[in-house]
Image (spheres, rainbow, N blue to C red):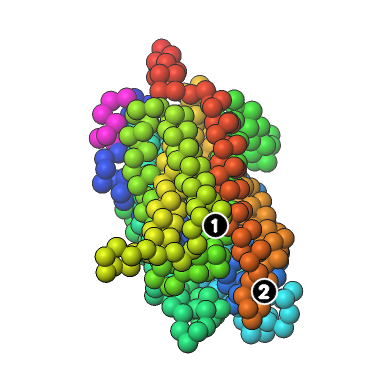
Amino acid sequence: MTEPKDSRRQSDAAPEDRCPTGAMMTYSLGECANSLVMNGIFGFAMLFYTKSLGLDPKWAGLAMSVSVFWEAITEPVMGHISDHTRSRWGRRHPYMLVGGLIMALCSYLIWTVPEALRSSQTTVFWYLVVMNLLLRTGLTMFFIPYLALGFEMCQDYLGRSRIQGMRWVFNMIANFAGPAMAWTFFFKDQGGVQATTVESNYHMMGGCFALATAVLVLIVVWRTFRWHVDTRHEVVSSNGGWFAGFVREMKQILGDRNPRWVFVFIFIVCVGMVVVSSLQMFVYDDFMKFSSWQKSLAHGGTMVGMALGALISSRLTALFDKRGAVLVGGMISIGCNLALAAIFLTGWMSPGHEIKIGETTVPLALILFVLFHAGYWLGNGIVLPVSTAMMADVSEIHRIQSGQNKDGAYSAVFSLAMRMAISFSLMVSGWCLSGIGYQVPAPVGGQTQAAIWQLGMITFVAGALICAVSLVAIRFYPITRDRLEEIRRSGRK
């Protein structure tokens, strides 16, 4: 039964019949689970570790960085394991189920530090390291097979951009419903106390997110199971053993010139994105001095912007091809962050600036911040799904030329580049906070004006400059739609 399915995937006939919009939406529910966990951590972990637990920012950044580095190491291994799994349930779904449930459980435990481990910063640090490692292990088991499944579900050139764009739309929907609205549901400032300093708020958020994550994992495994392929009878290569096969596979992928510049690009652009996302919460709190509802508006605006970017990414791909679409998205991100710098860092407008229009007071600073901040993430919403679709293309080229399915390995190495960037930039974010003189706990009079200005400088200007560097790399990506079709035709001869 597997042979006809594989042969259909190699053809160009009726690609939409193989992966209709409904199937793309069902698949994208898995991204909601990933989003609740990871965006919750990216959005609130640094606040939790520093403002609530009182951990030094350098230690907080290191705790998160170590776990992401562990994830970066294990993801290629997971890709190799998944590609070579032989079972009646296929090579993807068993890992998605087990890993997803581990991820859900640890996503709650990470916000609950036992009293016995609160005696010093060292014990708190090591608890967070261990729990983050367990969480990232579950995430790896879920996400790498999940990403590879998307490569296999949709095979046509533009369809790949559509399914990856839809995946990121669902990521932003969950991000908006969860981390963005958390400011309103879980982090309302009361009695003059900053809600981000109250630990019980994180407990409630973590419990809600963990339950929703577990439900979403079960749904996506169930609803995408029809895409599994019984692999029990596929031939397993034993040349040199498992480890030698893994090393050989990694050498082949890293030596493949087609995805090389995608790896470089995604590493650099993710460094900028993670630095901005890690520090933007501090910008809301300390630079813009937003209220709870304003934080929800600003944070929610980033999700709306990124979702809109993901929605138009396939259209931009049709107009400019994938490399051109990425360049357009990057330029939008750069322009919007530099606009924020020009408005707020130069003193042209103060963060709380308002204007009167008749009898109505208009919060102009808030409006401009939300619009340009959302615009920065709109550009990223174009960049991420299109670059992921690029990786699906190069994986198909490898399959055509070698006859081997390495979707798991290619998706893992792509994710490896992202995780290495995240690990590095989380540590950098902690260093940045310490370097600018950000004090934990905050002094009675609040952070110094110099520290607040430098916080905005790093978030707005450094984020734009890093994105600009990444666009230099993507210009060398060699695959176009015509080139892929040429390879497909030659492969059928």
Residue pointed to by mark 2: 440
Identify the image quadrant of residue 445. bottom right
Q: Secondary structure at mark 1?
A: loop
Identify the image quadrant of residue 365. bottom left
Can residue 282 be seen at all in this image of the molecule?
yes
Query: Image height check: is 21 above or below 251?
Result: below
Q: Nearer the viewer, residue 242 or 263?
A: 263
Quarter of the picture holding the C terminus? top left
Image location of residue 91, percent across then percent down: 47, 45
Image location of residue 386, percent across then percent down: 43, 37
Residue drawn at point x = 26 percent, y = 40 percent: 20
Q: Nearer the viewer, residue 192 or 54?
A: 192
| Residue 13: in magenta span | yes
Which residue type carries mark 1? Gly
Query: Image height check: is 131 above or below 257?
Result: below
Query: Image height check: is 401 above or below 304?
Result: above
Q: Which residues are magenta?
A: 12-18
Can residue 218 be seen at all in this image of the molecule?
no
Residue drawn at point x = 28 percent, y = 25 percent: 13
Q: Secondary structure at mark 2?
A: loop
The disc placed on residue 453 is none
The disc placed on residue 347 is 1
